[in-house]
Amino acid sequence: MDMNRRQFFRVSGAGLVGSSLVALGFSPTAALAETRNFKLARTTETRSTCPYCSVSCGLVMYTLGDKAKNVRSTIVHIEGDPDHPVNRGTLCPKGAGVMDMIQSPNRVKHPQVREAGSSEWKTISWDEALTRVARHMKADRDANLVKTVEKDGKAITVNRWNTAAFLVSSASSNESGYLSVKVARGLGMVALDTQARI
Ligand code: SF4
């Protein structure tokens, strides 16, 4: 191969640098592979449940963000959870598009209330929402709890609260489902249901 003096020095220099790096333990293959990192390599995995239907497929959400103060992590990818017994990694088209719902500007992220007589929805804090729910529940239970019913001429204690119902998420674990039922029954609620029946 013909080459001039300048080309000779350039080729020799590159070869020398390459062989020196190999001698020092730097593999060009590894260095090149480094630029082809798996796109989820620096993400955090969080397991969750698809919110759309009562099948409740398992999701793995991949979040990017270094968790530093004032840094908001962002979900960059979602896929079916291969270890979940319900869906074993699969998702239907609706569940596969759940990123669109999460990132939608129309998504409601805070509790809202529409006061009696108002046509506007007002955003409130979770503390206020829970306090209001508890207050409404107590007022309704105080007004409508059926303590006894008559049967065979005798008053039988029933403590039924028929004017409120409880809908439990199908995504609840056995443990949270058990506790939800205990709380609702303890208050006297008769009407309990779960999203899994929908
Ligand atoms: S992925 Fe589809 S089938 Fe599974 S819970 Fe979501 S909407 Fe339902």
Image (cartoon, rainbow, N blue to C red):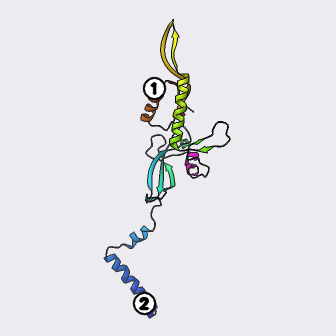
Answer above or below: position of 41 versus 119: below
Residue at left 44%, top 35%? 176
Q: Amino acid at mark 2?
A: Phe
Say above or below: 158 vs 127. Answer: above
> Secondary structure under badge 1?
helix
- Residue 116, position in %: x, y? 65, 36
Magenta stretch bounds: 91-108
Q: How many marks?
A: 2
Residue type beneath disc 1: Gly
Image position, residue 50 (x, y; %): 52, 44
Question: Can you say which quadrant of the picture contains the C terminus?
Answer: top right
* Residue depicted at x 55% and y 23%: 143
Closest to the observer, 60 or 178: 178
Q: Identify the residue at image location x=48%, y=28%.
A: 184
Q: Position of residue 16 (x, y in %)?
A: 36, 83
Q: Quadrant of the N terminus?
A: bottom left
Between the residue at mark 2 and the residue at mark 1, the CA separation in whole angstroms equals: 89 Å
Which circle marks residue 186 in the picture?
1
Residue 114: which disc? none
Within the image, what quadrant is residue 10 found in? Answer: bottom left
Q: Which residue is mark 2?
A: 8
Q: Nearer the viewer, residue 132 or 93?
A: 132
Question: Counting residues from the N terminus, which is met first, the one under dot 2 or under dot 1?
Answer: 2
Q: Nearer the viewer, mark 2 or mark 1?
A: 1
Residue 105 part of the magenta segment: yes
